[in-house]
């Protein structure tokens, strides 16, 4: 009798283990998803609205570009833009964020810029590295900086379109390689896998009041970012990384 009971216990334990494995594979039991953690930190702790991005349908290989899961066969930012839900659905609600990444644990995390969320200025990676070196040398404090292999995105305090227009008007020339992500814009947060490669922090966020990362004002960085971007060739008229 003991052997039979022991066997039953073993079979029950085996069945429970298999059930947990199947549950985990289905994506409904993935509490350790790195992207879910990233999304919850941004939304719940920092109050940055986020939305899942369009994942890669196929990663890039040598001589071939990555393919985006969105319907556009010529998508120039695969894995780095919202698709379903759309950008307007971006939220700081942790319940919604958990539900999204419970169903899509590997989805890129897209930050909706502007409003009360950070804005961003992005420029070619070479120009971005030079700009950061200049800021360090001159003692200018820089906040979080997001990097892909091809571009840097410098996060700044939210700014109004009118404010941006006045600052750009004062510049002799604003290169097209410098791009502005304000209301209606977005950037992929670190950990996201895009067609340009994995997104990472070039400069980690630093804490501030209420637990939010500290952000600089745009005007303290703009002159250097314009100057360094002007020295870097543009990648073309179409949006790219």
Image: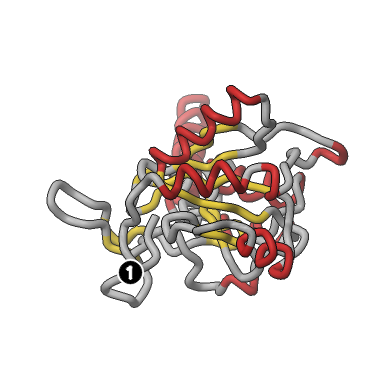
Q: Position of residue 14 (x, y in %)?
A: 45, 37
129 to the left or right of 63? right
Q: Residue at 60% across / 30% down in the picture?
A: 135
In this view of the protein, can residue 103 be seen by the observer? no
In this view of the protein, can residue 158 be seen by the observer? yes
Q: Where is residue 71 in the image (x, y as percent from the top left)?
A: 34, 77
Q: Name the residue under label 1.
A: 75
Which residue appears farthest toward the bottom when viewing the image? 71
Q: Residue at 64% across / 72% down in the picture?
A: 89
Q: Where is residue 59 in the image (x, y as percent from the top left)?
A: 27, 52
108 or 62, which lies in front? 62
Which residue appears farthest toward the front when viewing the image? 172
27 to the left or right of 171? left
102 to the left or right of 27? right
Q: Residue at 76% across / 33% down in the picture?
A: 207
Report the number of discs: 1
User: In which quadrant is the C terminus drawn?
Assistant: bottom left
Q: Where is residue 9 in the image (x, y as percent from the top left)?
A: 52, 33
Q: Is mark 1 on a helix, strand or loop?
A: loop
197 to the left or right of 182? left
Residue 1 drawn above or below residue 99: above
129 or 3, which lies in front? 129
Q: Is disc 1 surrounded by few (<14), some (14 to 19) or many (20+) residues within 10 Å?
A: some
Q: Residue at 76% across / 52% down in the picture?
A: 47
Residue 148 drawn above or below residue 51: above
């Amino acid at each position: 009798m003991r052997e039979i009971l022991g066997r039953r216990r073993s079979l029950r334990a085996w069945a429970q283990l298999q059930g947990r494995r199947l549950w985990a594979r289905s994506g409904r039991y993935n509490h350790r998803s790195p992207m879910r953690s990233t999304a919850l930190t941004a939304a719940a702790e920092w109050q940055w609205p986020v939305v899942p991005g369009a994942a890669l349908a196929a990663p890039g290989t040598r001589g071939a570009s990555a393919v985006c899961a969105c319907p556009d066969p010529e998508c120039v930012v695969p894995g780095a833009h919202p698709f379903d839900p759309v950008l307007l659905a971006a939220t700081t609600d942790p319940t919604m964020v958990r539900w999204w990444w419970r169903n899509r644990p590997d989805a890129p995390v897209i930050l909706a810029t502007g409003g009360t969320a950070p804005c961003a200025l992005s420029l070619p990676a070479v120009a971005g590295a030079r700009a950061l070196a200049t800021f360090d040398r001159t003692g200018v404090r820089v906040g979080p900086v997001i990097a892909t292999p091809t571009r840097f995105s410098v996060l700044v305090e939210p700014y109004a379109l009118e404010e941006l227009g006045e600052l750009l008007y004062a510049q002799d020339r604003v290169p097209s390689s410098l791009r502005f992500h304000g209301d209606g814009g977005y950037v992929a947060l670190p950990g996201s896998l895009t067609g340009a490669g994995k997104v990472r922090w070039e400069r980690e966020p630093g804490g501030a009041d209420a637990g939010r990362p500290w952000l600089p004002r745009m005007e303290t960085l703009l002159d250097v970012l314009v100057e360094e971007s002007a020295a870097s060739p543009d990648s073309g008229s179409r949006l790219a990384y």
